[in-house]
Amino acid sequence: MSNSGEYYTRDRWQNWLDRLREEEIDPENENSARLLLNLQDDAAIAVAKVLTDHEDGELGEEAAMDELERIREIVLSEVEFDDEEKLMLVDGVQTSLVCVFYAAEEYVVGGPAEEGTVEDYVRAAVDAEAEEEMDAAIGYCAQAGTRIIDGEELDMSLTEEVEYGLVAEWINGLDSLQTALADPEVVEEDEE
């Protein structure tokens, strides 16, 4: 049976944060943007691995939920940064990942959402956000996520229609999850 910490460790998250602390971060700069994306994708890959092992029968429902909870606690815990801008950027990554965890947990417990397509759910989320019904919005995003985990494509051209806001962040997280599910290879920390 797999031991805890195989999927993701606190050290791993800290290493990413330390790199962020050390580097001059400019979101307009390609390397900075990539560092943030890698931070996000790396966590999404851990989630994807849990989901894959669950699908393959290596992790039962309870074990999968425990692993997801463990990863969630690491990556969503409060981050200390002196630099306000970096804090905001990490906060954006964490916001994006919130939806990844919701989707993964919902999938483990209930499988993919039965009705509707990814696009239907994304549109419903956008409408809910417009009405300031954020609980409904994340619910729809998570349902979109369960469809993505089930193998349906998230068409990123959809995001061009989404106003910047929480739903946009959540969809960004689902895009990371989709990428991770397609290629659950670990992002190497020392890649330059």
Image (cartoon, rainbow, N blue to C red):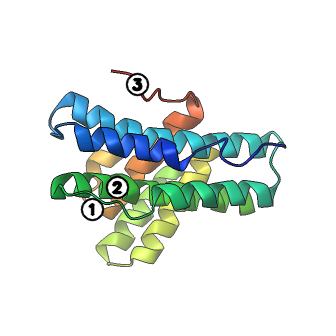
Identify the secondary structure beneath mark 2.
helix
Name the amino acid type tagged 1: Gly
What's the distance in space between the residues labelled 3 and 1, CA to CA? 32 Å
What's the distance in space between the residues labelled 3 and 2, CA to CA? 26 Å
On the image, numbered disc 2 is attached to which residue? 169
Among the 4 quarters of the image, the one containing residue 65: bottom right
Name the amino acid type tagged 3: Asp
Pinpoint residue 179: horizontal percent, then vertical percent.
50, 34
On the image, numbered disc 1 is attached to which residue? 165
First in sequence: mark 3 vs mark 2? 2
Question: As displayed, is residue 76 above or below residue 31?
Answer: below
Name the amino acid type tagged 2: Glu
Question: As displayed, is residue 31 above or below residue 165?
Answer: above
Seen at 43% across and 49% down, the residue is 173
Taking the image as shown, residue 88 lies to the left or right of residue 110, namely: left
Seen at 76% across and 46% down, the residue is 54
Q: Callout 3: 10 Å neighbours few (<14), some, many (20+)? A: few
Give yes or no for contact between labels 3 and 1 (Cβ–Cβ under 8 Å): no
Taking the image as shown, residue 158 lies to the left or right of residue 187, namely: left
Pinpoint residue 82: horizontal percent, then vertical percent.
20, 58
Pinpoint residue 122: horizontal percent, then vertical percent.
43, 57
Which label lies toward us, 3 or 1? Answer: 3
Q: Quadrant of the N terminus?
A: top right
Identify the secondary structure beneath mark 1.
loop
On the image, numbered disc 3 is attached to which residue? 190
